[in-house]
Amino acid sequence: MTAARAEPGQTLIKAEYGTLVWSEPLQGGGRAIMKMYRRRPFYDPVRRWFLPYRAEREFKVLSHLVRHGVACSEPLSWSHGHHDPHGRFELLVTREVAGATALDKLLKEPGAVTDLSPLLRLTRRMHDSGVSHGGLAPRNILVSFPVAGAPTFHIIDMSYSHIFPRGIAGTRMATFDLLDLVYRIGSHFPAQRCSAWLADYGLDASAVQKLMRGLERYRPRGHWAHLRRGETDLRAAMARLRAPRSPRDGDSRSAGPPAASGT
């Protein structure tokens, strides 16, 4: 797959200088989402002596969420290597959530989604599992609509996520995620609804009021976002140093060309 050419069955989703995303059929049915981080710098292999591959980190976080019953994009594999015309690349493969739509698109359609309490409960399960998202915005949440029943929410795009050795509900990392989410949904719903959904997450009345007050001075972008992300990175690194060693998560890594279908 390139920005200009797709193999039969492939569908281009996003093409940017450093990122290419497309879907293609899976042999056993359904479709895969292929997310490639490409044109990585020449010094990238040296950086990997100290930091994991981005695709590897996403794969491990998604695998962790699946094991803990948190609805997300199912991870299938990850790989890295060098492949013209993409240069050095990392590739994450996940199973497509069939029929799902990004929440940010649905919020632009009045009445498409009216109850976000299941999403806040899902966020609590993610935090109870020890995962901080780092970018919990509506564009990183998919919504599927079963024939019968309430909409189902799925968390995706774990590029800035971390796994902590224990649950993080009540910590600053969890608060960062909640501020990210409520700040963006707050323009579509009244404050009273958002407060009720935070109660569904599990916050008591005083904690809800404190977070809603925090929204008044919250800034989702710029240097404040970098500071919050840096703090989370540091806390995650310290938590890993203190935590006892455990067996590595399952690793479906393979080096070589980014996809068997001929990319």
Image (cartoon, rainbow, N blue to C red):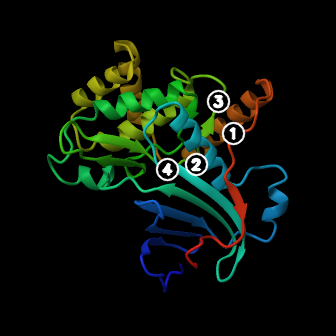
Q: Residue furthest bottom?
A: 4
Dot 4 corresponds to which residue?
221
The structure residue drawn at horizontal position 85% and vertical position 60%, both measured from the top left corner, is 46
**Circles 3 and 2: CB distance less than 8 Å?**
no
> Which mark identifies residue 223?
2
Q: Mark 1 belongs to which amino acid?
A: Asp
What residue type is disc 2 on? His
Q: Nearer the viewer, mark 4 or mark 1?
A: 1
Image spot of residue 154 (x, y percent): 39, 43
* Between marks 1 and 2 in the image, the one whose residue lies nearer the viewer: 1
Of the image marks 3 and 2, the number of the one nearer the N terminus = 3
What kind of residue is marked 3? Phe
Select label 3 or label 4 by which is in front: 3
Q: CA distance from mark 4 to mark 2?
A: 7 Å
Q: Residue at x 51, y 38 (%)?
A: 66
Q: CA distance from mark 3 to mark 2?
A: 24 Å
- Tell me which numbered mark, 1 or 3, is placed earlier along the sequence: 3
Q: Pick the residue in front: 113 or 226.
A: 113
Mark 1, residues whose alpha carbon is within 10 Å: few (<14), some, or many (≥20)?
few
Q: Does dot 3 land on a helix, a strand or a loop? A: loop
Residue beneath disc 3: 164
Is 232 drawn above or below residue 26 in the view shown? above
Q: Residue at x 44, y 75 (%)?
A: 10
- Residue position for label 1: 249
Q: Residue at x 65, y 78 (%)?
A: 86
